[in-house]
């Protein structure tokens, strides 16, 4: 999920809080809140105000897990809304669906194969798959990763029927994908940036075919084990004991299964692992991660897109890298400033189908702005 309206400046008003035994109460005196008893971290008043302002508008049983990275050092913070209170909780190990943040990992897998010399960004994927493409249309690896392939957001034979709305991708298998590619695929004439779940899901499938492995196996070998992310996976059963239930308006909803389009949004993770992945980006000698951050397309207002990442220049001349994600029961956001070694991870069980789920993006941007003053 990516909405460019969410990239605008986030204006945050002051919200009064009071901290009593790990609980924010709605009608108390203001105070500066610290989290010395939870994982040795601390948050500032500006950060606690931002969290309270966003979370108070969300549904009951909302759970949010936050990673704050300042100058390469990480702190964790968690909250849960129960009734009229927002309680602090220690949940840095809790796992959530991360939705389209998975696209960053699919792009990283692509960058690994490019750096290994197995493929080039501007190679066409056609020669790597046995199925012939409709009208012999050509698609490059680069265009799939930066959303300039001309593919639509979803394939035309992915039916979003009423009975599948709670798990819409689950039945979309390899046969259906190949039928689409062979029989009905049409690419837009103008190859402008147009966000495509199909494109990145198709990319993840193709990379697995090239490597002779499943998407999970390839991601595990190239990324999760490489960067020390033990609880990041596409296998829900592997982290079931850590999984936070996804919700829509407070009601528990089914998890999503991305099937053959796994690379578009099928990964689950926690703020510990994602913070570790952000810190890995600060290694100037890591050519693979640097490649994913290299601008491949210029967008409006000086913004850009790399491989997976969206590039957001700031008035302060800083450059932020961003991606968000959303599924039926979860919303997530990831921001980082590589030059200053700062970053924010926000994971939640707030459904992307809710109109107020933009609060998760807004919270990430508000928290990112506080890191500059610490």
Image (cartoon, helix red, strand yellow):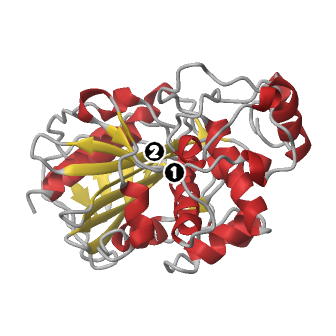
Tell me if residue 258 can be seen: no
| Residue at 58% from the left image edge and 80% from the top image edge | 225
Outermost residue to the top: 189
Task: Identify the secondary structure beneath mark 2.
Answer: strand
Q: Give the position of the C terminus as an image quadrant.
A: bottom left
Nearer to us in this view, 328 or 305: 305
Nearer to us in this view, 316 or 348: 316
Labelled disc at residue 101: 1
Query: Would you say the residues marked 2 and 1 are in contact, meaning their CB atoms lie under 8 Å apart?
Result: yes
Q: How crowded is mark 1: few (under 14 residues within 10 Å), some or many (20 or more)?
A: many
Instruction: Left or right? Give the position of 132 relative to 92.
Output: right
Q: Is residue 185 above or below residue 111?
A: above
List x then y, in percent, for residue 25.
29, 48
Q: In this view, does 372 lie above or below 137?
A: below
Tell me if residue 189 can be seen: yes
| Residue at 85% from the left image edge and 39% from the top image edge | 132
Q: Is residue 342 above or below residue 333?
A: below
List x then y, in percent, for residue 72.
25, 73
| Residue at 70% from the left image edge and 51% from the top image edge | 262
Labelled disc at residue 142: none
Tell me which label, 2 or 1, sits earlier in the chain.
Answer: 1
Task: Identify the secondary structure beneath mark 1.
Answer: helix
Residue denoted by label 2: 324
List x then y, in percent, for residue 316.
9, 46
**C-alpha distance separating marks 2 and 1:** 6 Å
Instruction: Left or right? Give the position of 256 relative to 275.
Output: right
Q: Determine the image quadrant of residue 7.
A: top left
Q: Residues within 10 Å of mark 2 (few under 14, many from 20)?
A: many
Q: Determine the image quadrant of residue 27.
A: top left
List x then y, in percent, for residue 101.
51, 51
């Amino acid at each position: 999920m990516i909405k460019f309206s969410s990239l605008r400046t986030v204006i945050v008003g002051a919200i009064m809080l009071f901290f009593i035994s790990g609980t924010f109460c709605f009608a108390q005196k203001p105070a500066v809140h610290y989290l010395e008893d939870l994982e040795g971290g601390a948050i500032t008043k500006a950060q606690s105000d931002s969290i309270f302002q966003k979370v108070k508008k969300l549904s009951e049983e909302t759970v949010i897990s936050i990673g704050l990275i300042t100058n390469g050092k990480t702190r964790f913070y968690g909250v849960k809304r129960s009734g009229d209170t927002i309680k602090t909780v220690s949940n840095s190990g809790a796992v959530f669906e991360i939705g389209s943040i998975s696209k960053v990992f699919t792009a990283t897998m692509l960058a690994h194969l490019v750096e290994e010399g197995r493929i080039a960004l501007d190679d066409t994927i056609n020669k790597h798959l046995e199925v012939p493409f409709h009208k012999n249309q050509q698609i490059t690896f680069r265009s799939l990763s930066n959303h300039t392939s001309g593919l639509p957001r979803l394939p035309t034979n992915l039916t979003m029927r009423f009975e599948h709305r709670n798990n819409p991708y689950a039945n979309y298998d390899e046969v259906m994908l190949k039928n689409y590619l062979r029989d009905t695929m049409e690419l837009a004439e103008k190859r402008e940036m147009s966000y495509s779940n199909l494109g990145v899901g198709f990319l993840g499938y193709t990379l697995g075919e090239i490597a002779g492995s499943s998407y999970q196996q390839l991601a595990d070998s190239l990324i999760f084990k490489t960067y020390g992310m033990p609880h990041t996976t596409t296998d829900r059963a592997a982290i079931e004991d850590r999984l936070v239930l996804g919700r829509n308006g407070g009601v528990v909803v089914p998890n999503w299964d991305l099937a053959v389009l796994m690379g578009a949004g099928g990964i689950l993770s926690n703020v510990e692992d994602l913070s570790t992945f952000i810190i890995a980006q600060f290694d100037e000698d890591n050519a693979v991660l640097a490649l994913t951050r290299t601008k491949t397309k210029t967008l409006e207002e000086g913004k850009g897109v790399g491989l997976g990442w969206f590039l957001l220049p700031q008035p302060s001349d800083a450059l932020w890298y961003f991606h968000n994600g959303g599924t039926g029961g979860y919303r997530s956001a990831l921001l980082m400033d590589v030059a200053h070694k700062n970053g924010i991870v926000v994971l939640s069980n707030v459904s992307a189908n809710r109109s107020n789920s933009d609060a998760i993006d807004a919270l990430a941007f508000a928290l990112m702005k506080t890191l500059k003053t610490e």
